[in-house]
Amino acid sequence: MQLLHGSIAQQAIVHLQHGPKFDPDSANNNRRVTVESRKKESFTMAYANETLSVGGSLAQRLREMRAAFADRRARYGLYRKTLHELEGLTERDLTDLGLSRSNIRDVALTAAYGTPR
């Protein structure tokens, strides 16, 4: 099961279907079909079926969306603040921190989101 968005889950189900073979070019199509011949001349086909299930109420999903939006907004604010503060430092201050101007963006992204993009 995969979680797609909020409380929507997607589940793939694989089914097997068995049936008799049919060969339109065969001259034996008019013969009597027995259980033994069905077992010998059958096929197995697999097909996938995907279902979506939505859990929770609309109010719950809206609360989750609001919380996710607030989290994204807070992370972006932290990114902008870190970026602004690092861009305001002199070359000497950046060198003391072991940074250069070229990797300020990566440091700000790591501070806000955990990994550089």
Image (cartoon, rainbow, N blue to C red):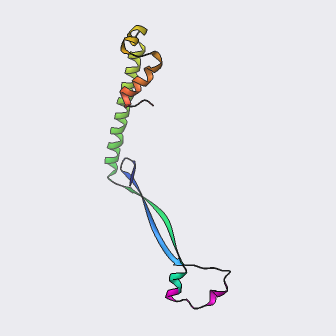
59 up-or-down from 11: above or below: above
- Residue 43 x %, y %: 53, 75
Residue 99 inside the magenta-drawn segment: no
Query: Which quadrant of the figure contains the N terminus?
Result: bottom left
Residue 28 inside the magenta-drawn segment: yes
* In the foreground, 98 or 24: 98
- Residue 72 x %, y %: 38, 33
Q: Residue furthest bottom?
A: 32
- Residue 51 x %, y %: 43, 60
Q: Tell me the residue at 37%/36% (across/down).
A: 69
Residue 66: quadrant of the picture: top left
Query: Which quadrant of the figure contains the C terminus?
Result: top left
Residue 11: quadrant of the picture: bottom left
Is residue 65 shown left or right of residue 105?
A: left
Is residue 112 shown left or right of residue 46?
A: left
Residue 93: quadrant of the picture: top left
Q: Which residues are magenta?
A: 26-36
Number of dots carrying numbers: 0
- Residue 2 x %, y %: 40, 52
